[in-house]
Image: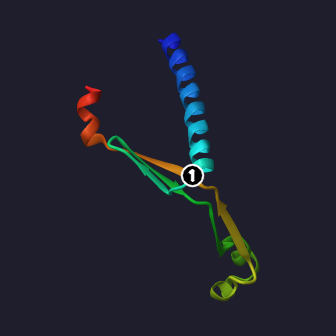
Amino acid sequence: MLELLYELTLKKKAIEAQLKAINEEILNNADNLELEDDHIKVSIIPESSYKTLDMTKVKNKEPELYNELLDVYPKEVSRKAYVKVKIKWKKNLSKIK
């Protein structure tokens, strides 16, 4: 059983590396935000960022001013772009069996 676990883990890591390379290629080269065929739909989610209130600083320094301090204690969060893959299972289910 340990040998099987070892082999599957190696295969999983190899597949994850291939998927990462494919996703990076899609992010860098795709002209459209969505790619689709009969089996799969790929959506490119662009990079984004937003501001939120740093609750730790507010609670520690001036908890009574919580609603007024967004501009004083901003925290910017960035999200990297990523690829979202949706398999069309209903159409492919018969192929898996």
**Picture coordinates of residue 75, whole percent (x, y):** 71, 71
Q: Is residue 17 above or below residue 40?
A: above
Badge count: 1
Residue situated furthest front in the rendering? 31
Count residues near mark 1 (Cα–Cα under 10 Å), then give few for <14, some for 14-19, many for 20+.
some
Q: Which residue has dot 1 on it?
A: 82
Q: Is residue 19 above or below residue 58?
A: above
Q: Is residue 30 left or right of residue 56?
A: left
Judge by depth and name the residue closer to the eye, 54 or 37. 37
Picture quadrant of residue 38: top left
Which residue shows up at 72% across the image and 76% down it? 74
**Picture coordinates of residue 11, whole percent (x, y):** 53, 21
**Secondary structure type for disc 1:** strand
Which residue shows up at 56% across the image and 38% down it? 22
Q: Is residue 40 left or right of residue 81?
A: left
Q: What type is the residue that disc 1 sits on?
A: Tyr
**Picture coordinates of residue 14, whole percent (x, y):** 58, 25
**Picture coordinates of residue 60, whole percent (x, y):** 74, 75
Picture quadrant of residue 78: bottom right
Picture quadrant of residue 47: bottom right
Judge by depth and name the residue closer to the eye, 63 or 39. 39
Q: Is residue 34 above or below residue 48?
A: above
Q: Quadrant of the C terminus?
A: top left
Which residue shows up at 53% across the image and 15% down it? 7
Q: How is the image coloured?
A: rainbow
Which residue shows up at 50% across the image and 20% down it? 8
Q: Is residue 88 left or right of residue 6?
A: left
Q: Is residue 76 above or below residue 80?
A: below
